[in-house]
Image (tube, coloured by chain):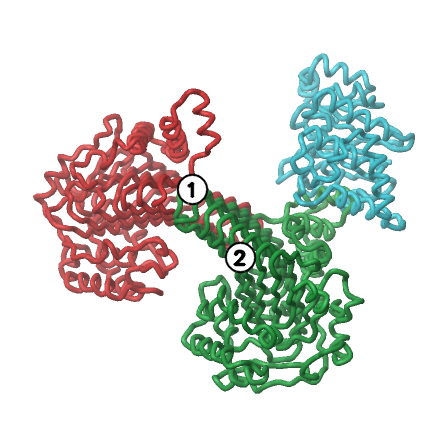
Chain colours: A cyan, B green, C red
Amino acid sequence: MLVIKNLHAAIEGKKILRGISLEVKPGEIHAIMGPNGSGKSTLAAVLAGRDLAEVTEGSVTYFGRNLLEMAPEDRSREGIFLGFQYPIEIPGVSMVNFLKTAVNEHRKYKGLEPLSASDFLRIMREKKELVDIDSKLANRSVNEGFSGGEKKKNEIFQMAMLEPKLAILDETDSGLDIDALRVVANGVNKLKRPDNSAIVITHYQRLLDYIVPDVVHVLYDGRIVKSAGKELALELEEKGYDWIKKEVDNQN
Amino acid sequence: MLVYDKRKLMETDQDRIINDVTSGDYKYGFYTDIETEKIPRGLNEDTVRLISEKKEEPEWLLEFRLKSFRQWQNMKMPSWANLKIPEIDYQDIIYYAAPRQKPRVNSLDDIDPELKRTFDRLGIPLEEQKHLSGVAVDAVMDSVSVKTTFRETLAEMGIIFCSFSEAVREFPELVRRYMGSVVPYTDNFFAALNSAVFSDGSFCYVPKGIRCPMELSTYFRINSANTGQFERTLLVADEESYVSYLEGCTAPMRDENQLHAAVVEIIAEKNAEVKYSTVQNWYPGDKDGNGGIFNFVTKRGLCRGEGSKISWTQVETGSAITWKYPSCILRGDNSTGEFYSVAVTNNHQQADTGTKMIHIGRNTKSTIVSKGISAGYGQNSYRGLVKVLKNAKDARNFSQCDSLLLGDKCGAHTFPYLEVDNQSAIVEHEATTSKIGEDQIFYCNQRGISTEDAIGLIVNGYAREVINKLPMEFAVEAQKLLQISLEGSVG
Amino acid sequence: MAVNSELTELYSGIYTDNIRRIREGSTSFLNAFRDAAFDRFTTLGIPTRKNENYKYTNLDLFFRHNYKTYFIPDESDFVKAEEFRCDITDLDTHGVVLLNGFYPTINGKIRTLPGEILIGSLNEASRRFPDLVERHYGKYAKSNSDGLVHLNTAMASDGVFVHVPQGSHLNKPVQVINLVDSTEDVFNQHRNLIIVDDNADLTIIICDHTLSPQKFLTNAVTEIYVGENARFNIIRVQNEHNNACKVTHTFIHQGRNSYSSSNNLTLHGGLVRNNTYHFLGGEGAESSSFGLYLSDKWQHVDNLVSVEHAFPNCTSNQLFKGVLDEMSTGAFNGRIFVDPKAQGTLAYQKNNNILLTDDAKMYTKPQLEIYADDVKCSHGATVGQLDENALFYLQSRGIDKREAKLLLMLGFAHEVIQNIGVEALRERIDNLVMQRLKGELSRCASCMVKCG
């Protein structure tokens, strides 16, 4: 569904991604790991269409279409969901209003009628239970005054509402205690269907105890330097990133 | 090799959206072709006498007008506001225009059907059965009140709600006692002008212990060309009473500017509470800044009795220029003043608006929440005074004045004055100015919401605290109005 | 413009009566500014309270008086000036003294310090370094509303001159001690010019003292140029008696990527009005403006701060705090102006005040004028008392209420004091403030005048 070829991107002239190639097929879960500053979040931002990074080379196709030419909202409507590392606060805008607008925009895109208020609230209730989110959160403004854990749970809740084909979770585990981590991971697992995929970006292996990846990639200095099965995550946990850094640096 | 400049794409996109928004149509710009009685242009003592004569006014009121006129002649237009006001020729304005109809309207059948249609189009049906339940309306076109609904129903509870002219005829002692007691004719240039030439407006008196069961509302409509509108509203809430009042206003689209200089006075006696809400949607002029209403208004409430409360809520989206400072004089001990405002300036609109909270009594409290939104070439200033007098022991004030900028050609300004003469006072002012957050827009985009809708959501969220203070029916209106006046105006 | 015509005439009279003597004592360069400045002064006049910027300050009290005015220094007075020693023992500075606005000749009128740094008399500098002075003099001290700036330009003959050439810096701060001392009531108008060239660095401390109990009026203008990448700090310690009125106008003009800070510490004085203008005249410049005022009796302290963001990506910060006791009054008038082209501006402004008595008054007017959209600006102002919760917290730990209040007030003031970069001075000020708040210092430090 997603094919990334030789992707280069820069932020304010500084090269961050230096030729990433990656293919995600329906139903697969890919984990992207790597030390701080390796370009993980930039990759997520480029895929979602954030204009901070400029693509200088390479291509990304999504179901055969040129993803890079699509507006961020259309990427969303086509089924790409980004779980933000730092979810944004929008004061005064209630979660209900926010999500109703989002869900109905998705429906409009697909040629469906907007949901009635009661249908919407019913679905919201179901999804809230599914991801085990406090129902009070829905009455509050988007992310405003949420704790770190609440924000991350809220991302998973939105993912449940929007039912993406490709979820990109950018360090969704960062800043979570073990209980919150479990809630978030369970939510992701419950939302897993045979045909939808996920890219899980993380610094630590512990999230992968709960969300089991098909492939693990190691991103270093803007390139994927190693790809292997889930056992690679354990190896990284044990040995850290230094040995990979050395391996790569020696090659250069 | 693919070189892809996302930023560029976004910019052109946003430019387009800004254009869409700033060319948003004014939906109330039509003109009603109705026979209108007008007096000649110009202003002198004879004009003042003529207006008074047309309204068959008692001698004392004529005297009040003449005193005001003489005062006005010796005054200069204020220049301290952060506004660029073109020269106004006060001799080129028509000071009285009235839709021709029978002098006293007794039933709906006496009202010109064209007038009824006009108010229907504005969403203000004059037939009581058609109207939103629980809202009584005084409909004012140009210089006169056309119809006040639910008058009789309210009268049964002792509540007087009628046009100002009727009040002068039927309750002269009440009018005489209160008129000018909060805004004296000497107060300022526009108040003096209004006191000399005011034509009509609404009058309301809520007797002791009565909670007014419905929203009272005045709808102001300017229709005739070259005409100034000078209405006067007087609201008296007697001890232990409550009333919620709303005013709305619109005008046809014209190339020339029209002057609107109103006076609103509120008196709240012991433990009375008055909520005064405004949804101001006078014609703002076109996108190049031609035409539009000059809205120079003096609004002031006096919390005269102990424990009284006056709350101003305003949503200002219209007018070419707004000069307006709804204020509270907190004379009664334990009295409370509130000011909640959303002011939008788009295209070439200018607004200098805010409030004054004068703490005189002990333990008085005031709250100010002002949300300015500037777009296009709009200039938006908050100007406010919090004054704590020496005897106002334990006075409290909190002010929050935020400005949101959409686009790089507009301006947002904040001019607060805090004057504290009492050590037990706590006065706090906070203000922020920022542009709409790109990260917020992107977050919405990522959830499938278009940039235009995202701005609508974010602006409404930003203004929520104020909108929530409006009566429910009008909150929805105000929200829509906000969206219309700003649709897509981000850069 | 609101003009106090009577006072304006009084001061115009002083000018016309003495212009010949003023010209004689000055260089032709300084004299070249006088006519135009006097013209502007007569139009703008002595500000009244109808002037929006002087809304809360009545200058009448001090301006309506017949002062003696000096136009040529009296050399015999300078002996006393030389004897004056700053009593901050650990404070190691390059000191210079101004007496009644004039620079004493005893040590030569201009000193050259390592790095070709010049310190001395402005009058002398305009003779010996005309190019340098001409490049900057009169370029920054501009005002469309304040006649006093022009009155200074019309009449000023001397003051301090400092030049730090490109890349130079001093190992210790420059300290200017402003003394007023006379057997007569004196009006003085000195003029300082400070030039900090590209990549240079300077810290200057200005201490104001009154040595005799006469009535004094000072109207001082300081022009400061801070070049690209340069750093500059100015700290004013104002310690005058209650019969003295001090009006200062400080114009700081900054170039690209430069930094400047200003700190106005008003510990004592009858009427103090500080006008501090920061002009961020190059991309990436940063400025900080701090102020602390402690007042009692009938004292009046008014600070006007104006920060103009004229270029993109500049940052500014204002923090002014006041503790007002007895019948004193305070005013703060802060302004942030953001030009349409100053995108990426960050600007903050805060003014907090504590009133200690029912007779003390505070007027504050924090203002934002913003014409660019990519900005983050905020301001806050408060007038109130000490936090009751904090007070209780301290008491619950066994600290008695009086002491607890003192601690909280010191903490309140320290937020400003901590920004003083010169350690010895910082400690000294902390100390002075403590004495002041304890009521142990009812008159200015090192002052032999009992004015209380």
Residue B125 or residue B280, whichever sits in front? B125
Question: Alpha carbon of mark 2 to alpha carbon of mark 1: how far?
Answer: 25 Å
Amino acid carrying label 1: it is: Ser
Image height of C278 relative to A138, above or below: below
Residue most extreme to the right:
A194
Residue hosting label 2: B354
Image height of B127 relative to B479, above or below: below
Quadrant position of the N terminus of chain C in the picture: bottom left
Residue drawn at the location 44% of the way across and 25% of the way down: C394
Q: Is residue C278 left or right of residue A52?
A: left
Q: Is residue A57 left or right of residue B323?
A: right
Residue B31 sits in which quadrant? Answer: bottom right
Quadrant position of the C terminus of chain C in the picture: top left
Residue hosting label 1: B424
Residue most extreme to the left:
C76
Give x and y (percent) for residue C347: 49, 45
Give x and y (percent) for residue C180: 18, 44
Mark carried by residue C77:
none
Residue B313 appears in view: no
Image height of A195 relative to B291, above or below: above
Residue A224 sits in which quadrant? Answer: top right
Q: Earlier in the sequence, mark 2 or mark 1?
A: 2
Amino acid carrying label 2: it is: Gly
Give x and y (percent) for residue B284: 63, 67
Give x and y (percent) for residue C134: 28, 53
